[in-house]
């Protein structure tokens, strides 16, 4: 017997009040338009703003003194900056996955979470983009990475994965923005028409670009949206693949491996879904969206995390296996050093937070408990950060010649920049939930059951 | 040119099914210049309105091809023509290393063409349009479905169109002027 709930629409009629086109519009739009700014929002925004100021201080000091304020030195030239870059950009991947791949697979449940997951992508990529630029040493020459005819008659070296990164991340940022903005246009028009205050009407009106919901416009709009989803799907896979090339093209032990691209992409989706979970659980509670972001959404995300987490686990296993199987001294030593060297506590924390704890998701009881899901999601975010730290630091700090070995310890400025980037992320997120609809209104209307009750408001 | 006079006659419907029926009926009476306005896309409605051909996929394909060629030859020019460097004895035109950037630029240009093409074909941004002159029209982005038969249709006759729309069970019929 097939579970009848399998084909149930996103809004489970059992626990959702019967929404109509009008009431769902009002519910989501009112969060932006008429809900007063609460003390909770101001407090959260204030904390984010303080962290953002920490970022400003850390970056200003960096510009004055140079990258020497960080713990990096030879042999560990890549420290927190690259760890944070890979971590943030990985988090972004879930947004694109939810908005494009699940759209192509006709997974209707994505509708409640795709808008803020896309926003999360955009903000995470903004945070990610900061780090390689700051790590350049002279960030004010960042535009030298872009090919343009210049008086120095120099061109970027296109055989280098670091230049590929510029194009991958730049394209990812642009396409994520386009996708998010195109999705927002009809909702901006809704806000324009629902806003009571003149200033809000003007601002939303400009952003909506005169959208009037013409059927012929909708037809082209849907084509464009579907094509963007089709383009973003290979893009999201390529971005983390290119990020993994930064490592795997090099011959450093522990990096030079063909498993890196798939294992990085799976890890990215894993951490991204964990972040969507971390954000959606408080959001649905604060804004009373439990009937739109239902338990089913959380359970589905938990299952995606379980699947991608297993791929990541396979990656860890294969790394260890290949280190032994290759018989290569440096690879074998790298693995021994990870498991028993000076960074071993971090390695084993990574295994626990990223591999052992998420196994709890096999149990239905855990998948049905919101606090448990929240705890697992936090654990995965910590674990994925540790994974990048282990990959970057343990491989570099003891590579080939023992005479060149050294330790890497982050300084207060490393931590300040990292905390500051979280501040930037939260700052943008708080602004987003205050000024833009965090759930796509037009897509919600589209998936409401038809026919609607006669004389619905 | 600032146009004045009647832009069209607009009917308001409460349910999408009624709008689709109305479009079919009005078209069967021979009217062609019309547009429907809905709070969410309704499958097949553009087709009912006589818009069968969508050029957008072609535009995106052209964008993708331009991005791929432009991306590859930009790298070829930079690393083969303008600044050839011997990197470990590899050929100047080491094309496999140029694939990632070529791929990214294919996606980038195709996506830009998709969005800008969609906006251009839709004539957006267009801050004002005669349909906004009707105060009820703000429900077109909430829960009402509108059909506007435009006066530029050669068969247009204000009273005949009004009558047809009223017979179709519209919950309101409004006359829209070019100027509010």
Image (cartoon, rainbow, N blue to C red):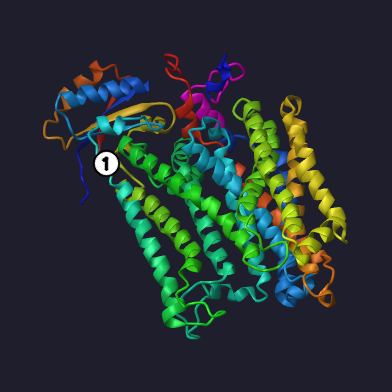
Q: Residue at x 73, y 40 (%)?
A: A377
Where does the image place residue A329, in percent across and percent down from the top left? Answer: 78, 66
Where does the image place residue B156, in percent across and percent down from the top left? Answer: 14, 31
Q: Does residue A11 show up magenta in the picture?
A: yes
Q: How many marks?
A: 1
Query: Mark 1 packing: few (<14 Cα in 10 Å), some, or many (20+)?
Result: some
Residue tagged 1: B179
**Span colored in magenta:** A10-28
Where does the image place residue A431, in percent across and percent down from the top left? Answer: 62, 47
In this image, A72 relative to A15: left or right? right
Viewer-nearest residue: B156 or A162: A162
Q: Secondary structure at mark 1?
A: loop
Question: Quick check: can you spot residue A202?
Answer: no
Q: Residue at x 37, y 36 (%)?
A: A213
Q: Does residue A24 show up magenta in the picture?
A: yes
Location of residue B88 by image quarter: bottom right
Q: Residue at x 76, y 43 (%)?
A: A355
Taking the view exactly as shown, the residue that stands out farthest to the left is: B154
- Chain of the residue displaying label 1: B
């Amino acid at each position: 017997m097939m579970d009848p709930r399998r084909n149930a629409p996103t809004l489970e009629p059992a626990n959702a009040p019967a929404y109509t086109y009008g009431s769902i519009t009002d519910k989501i739009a009112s969060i932006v338009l008429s809900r007063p700014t609460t003390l909770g929002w101001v407090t959260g925004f204030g904390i984010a703003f303080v962290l953002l100021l920490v970022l400003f201080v850390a970056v200003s000091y960096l510009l004055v003194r140079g990258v020497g304020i960080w713990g990096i030195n030879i042999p560990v030239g890549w420290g927190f900056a690259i760890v944070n870059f890979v971590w943030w950009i990985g988090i972004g991947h879930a947004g694109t996955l939810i908005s494009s791949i699940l759209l192509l697979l006709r997974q209707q449940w994505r509708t409640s979470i795709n808008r803020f997951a896309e926003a999360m992508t955009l903000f995470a990529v903004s945070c990610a983009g900061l780090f390689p630029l700051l790590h350049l040493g002279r960030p004010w020459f960042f535009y030298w990475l872009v090919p343009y005819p210049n008086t120095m008659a120099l061109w970027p070296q296109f055989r280098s994965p670091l230049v590929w990164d510029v194009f991958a991340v730049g394209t990812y940022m642009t396409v994520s923005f386009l996708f998010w903005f195109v999705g927002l246009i009809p909702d901006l028009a809704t806000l324009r028409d629902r806003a009571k205050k003149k200033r809000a009407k003007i601002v939303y009106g400009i952003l909506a670009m005169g959208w009037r919901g013409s059927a012929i416009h909708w037809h082209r709009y849907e084509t464009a949206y579907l094509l963007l989803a089709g383009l973003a799907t290979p893009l999201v896979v390529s971005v983390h693949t290119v990020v993994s090339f930064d490592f795997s093209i090099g011959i450093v032990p522990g990096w030079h491996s063909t498993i890196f691209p798939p294992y990085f992409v799976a890890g990215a989706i894993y951490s991204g879904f964990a972040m969507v979970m971390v954000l959606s659980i408080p959001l649905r509670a604060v804004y009373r969206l439990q009937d739109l972001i239902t338990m089913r959404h959380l359970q589905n995300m938990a299952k995606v995390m379980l699947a991608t987490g297993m791929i990541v686990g396979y990656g860890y296993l294969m790394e260890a296996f290949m280190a032994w199987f290759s018989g290569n001294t440096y690879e074998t030593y790298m693995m021994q050093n990870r498991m028993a060297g000076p960074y071993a506590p971090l390695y084993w924390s990574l295994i626990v937070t990223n591999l052992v704890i998420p196994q709890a998701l096999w149990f239905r009881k855990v998948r049905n408990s919101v606090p448990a899901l929240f705890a697992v999601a936090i654990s995965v975010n910590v674990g994925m950060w540790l994974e990048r730290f282990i990959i970057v630091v343990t491989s570099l700090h003891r590579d080939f010649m023992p005479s060149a070995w050294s330790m890497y310890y982050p300084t207060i400025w490393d931590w300040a920049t990292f905390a500051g980037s979280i501040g930037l992320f939260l700052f943008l997120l708080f602004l987003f939930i205050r000024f833009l609809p965090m759930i796509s209104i037009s897509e919600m209307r589209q998936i409401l059951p038809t026919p609607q009750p006669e004389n619905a408001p | 040119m600032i146009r004045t006079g009647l832009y069209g006659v607009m009917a308001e419907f409460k349910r999408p099914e009624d709008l689709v029926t109305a479009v079919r009926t009005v078209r069967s009476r021979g009217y062609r210049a019309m547009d429907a306005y809905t709070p969410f896309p309704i499958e097949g409605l553009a087709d009912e309105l006589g818009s069968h051909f969508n050029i957008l996929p072609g535009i995106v394909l052209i964008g993708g091809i331009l991005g791929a060629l432009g991306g590859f030859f930009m790298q070829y020019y930079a690393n083969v023509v303008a600044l050839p460097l011997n990197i470990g004895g590899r050929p100047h035109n080491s094309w496999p290393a140029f694939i990632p950037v070529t791929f990214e630029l294919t996606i980038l240009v195709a996506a830009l063409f998709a969005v800008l093409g969609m906006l251009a074909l839709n004539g957006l941004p267009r801050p004002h349009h005669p349909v906004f002159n009707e105060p009820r029209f703000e429900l077109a982005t909430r829960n009402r479905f509108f059909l506007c038969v435009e006066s530029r249709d050669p068969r247009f006759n204000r009273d005949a169109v009004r009558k047809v729309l009223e017979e179709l069970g519209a919950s309101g019929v409004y006359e829209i002027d070019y100027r509010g």
